[in-house]
Amino acid sequence: MDRIFTVEEAKSLLPKVLEHVRELVTLRADLAELSYDLKQSGLSAIGGIPESKAYEARMDEILSWFAAEGMEIKGIAPVLIDFPAVLEDGVSVRLCWLEGEEELAWYHRSELGFSGRRPLLDDHAQSHA
């Protein structure tokens, strides 16, 4: 069975999430720059094909960590992460975090996706396991 998070569980993971996201963002930018340089001139100050493969492998490791923890990666540019949860009234939702946000403060019904995002209010959107 897929992991279901409480709001507290998801928020407690945020420091580790932010750590991994910072590394992922750096790798994403380095890989974009490296790929562009290699396509344009065949040379890059930050490396070549071996470095590109290493960046991709490390990105895969980070993405695998999120999946192993039960999170859903919805995008990597920008990074968008959903935490499956269930509201007290039984509604299936995703606690939603977007790159650049300082805290986990949004959710959306599972079937609505990002366009259905709402503020996570402690009295309305509490979840349980």
Image: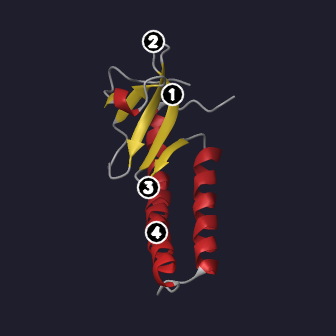
Q: Residue 74: x percent and y percent?
A: 49, 42
Vertical comparison of 91 with 84: above or below: above
| Residue carrying label 3 | 18
Amino acid on which disc 1 is placed:
Ala
Amino acid on which disc 2 is placed:
Asp
| Residue carrying label 2 | 89
Residue at point 47%, 64% (across, down)? 28
Closer to the eye: label 4 or 3 = 4
| Secondary structure at numbered mark 1 | strand
Cα–Cα span, label 2 and label 3: 30 Å
Cα–Cα span, label 1 and label 4: 34 Å
| Residue carrying label 1 | 85
Q: Quadrant of the N terminus?
A: top right
Q: Residue lying farthest right?
A: 1
Dot 4 alpha-carbon crowd within 10 angstroms: few under 14, some 14 to 19, many 20 or more: few
Cα–Cα span, label 1 and label 3: 20 Å
Residue at point 62%, 59% (across, down)? 60
| Secondary structure at numbered mark 2 | loop
Q: Residue lying farthest front?
A: 40
Residue 97 left/right relative to 31:
left
Residue 47 location, quadrant: bottom right
Is disc 2 in contact with disc 3, using a CB cutoff of under 8 Å?
Answer: no
Closer to the eye: label 1 or 4 = 4
Q: Quadrant of the C terminus?
A: top right
Closer to the eye: label 2 or 4 = 4
Residue 26 location, quadrant: bottom left
| Residue carrying label 4 | 32
